[in-house]
Image (cartoon, rainbow, N blue to C red):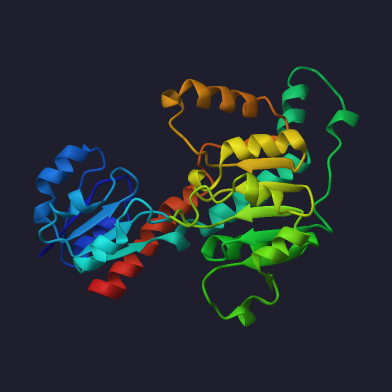
Amino acid sequence: MKKILIVDDLHEIIIPFLEKNNFQVDYQPNIEPAKILEIIADYQGLIVRSKIKIDKFFLDHCDNLAFIGRAGAGLDLIDLQEAQRRNIDVFAANEGNADAVAEHTIGMILGLFNKLNFADAEVRQFIWERERNRGIELKGMTVGIIGFGNMGTAVAQRLVGFGVKVLAYDKHEKDWTTYGLIAQKATLQDIFEQADVVSLHVPLTHETRMMVDDDFLAQFKKNIFLLNTSRGEVVSLKSVYNALQTGKLRGACLDVLEHEKLNKLTPEQTELYKALFQMSNVLFSPHIAGWTVESYRKISEVLMEKIQDRWL
């Protein structure tokens, strides 16, 4: 019987599925990272969210590991080259939270455009100020989507009814004829020249780390709105602050931050965050774009499908 270790919280539907298919499931969502190292040699499968970094040191302890399932999107915490060298199959559940990310992305931009966070706070203080809270419309704008995988595609699908032009850029080749009704294939240069709104949906890699910096933002012909629901380290917050100060950024929606452990910021980082937190044209959420009741279940369902396809 194959043994599988689950070290993060997952929807309960996955356990009976695995047990029915001859896996011995060890569900330990509260296990400490050091304890994982002690026992991982006994397992053929590992399912993880974000608890541990799976690097060469970790994999040196994995004598029998055949696959790693990531309960979420993105594999930046896993050394993919080292896993491949050891013939360990690695897969994520990107499809499981694409709908959640897309809806959150749309919600953030509409909230920012209509000043809903600011207006709500005022009304709760018995302030009824209409002119100061006058919004702008998304219709007629050009939206550039950088990264057109599961998340970017889902965002484009939801933009169809808003009367916008969607430009989509992805470094990977794909059959663009299937996306013709929702987006136009574009280069980064096309997005730099035409976009009013830019939404990031790229994985964190050596190419995308700090991709959005001063030089990147300076290339846009228009003053833009920026959305990041991908990974915090894709965007330099210092560059975002600079561009907000100059007006190159008209506003930003940030679900992810460069440093998300807010109690461990350096004094310099704390000052930068405080400055951003004071800006009414920046909307924040705590890395919850893919974090819905429905996605919690869907992620387990996607993992089940991929385990079934590969191992059953």
Is 38 left or right of 87, judged from the image as shown?
A: left
> In the depicted view, which residue is nearer to us: 276 or 215?
215
Residue 115 in view in this figure: no
Where residue 163 sits, quadrant-wise, is bottom right
Quadrant of the rendering where the N terminus is positioned: bottom left
Q: Quadrant of the C terminus?
A: bottom left
Above or below: residue 275 compared with residue 181: above
Percent from the top left, x then y, of residue 7?
25, 46
Q: Nearer the viewer, residue 129 or 152?
A: 152
Residue 13 in view, yes or no: yes
Q: Position of residue 267 (x, y in %)?
A: 49, 20
Query: Residue 139: percent from the left, percent from the top?
Result: 82, 56
- Where 97 falls versus 170 (above or below)? above
Left/right of residue 72 with respect to residue 158 in the rendered view = left
- Residue furthest top in the image: 125
Q: Residue 200 at x, y = what percent?
A: 59, 54
What residue appears at the point 48 percent right and 47 percent down from the top-left corner?
293
Q: Residue furthest right?
A: 131
Answer with the quarter of the image where residue 265 lies: top left
- Tally of marks: 0
Give the left or right position of residue 25, taking residue 150 as reference.
Answer: left
Identify the residue at horizontal 55%, vertical 60% (top origin): 151
Residue at the image point whose x is 71% and y is 36% from the top: 244
Viewer-nearest residue: 303 or 271: 271
Left or right of residue 53, residue 99 in this image? right
Which residue is drawn at the image coordinates 32% and 45% (left, top)? 9
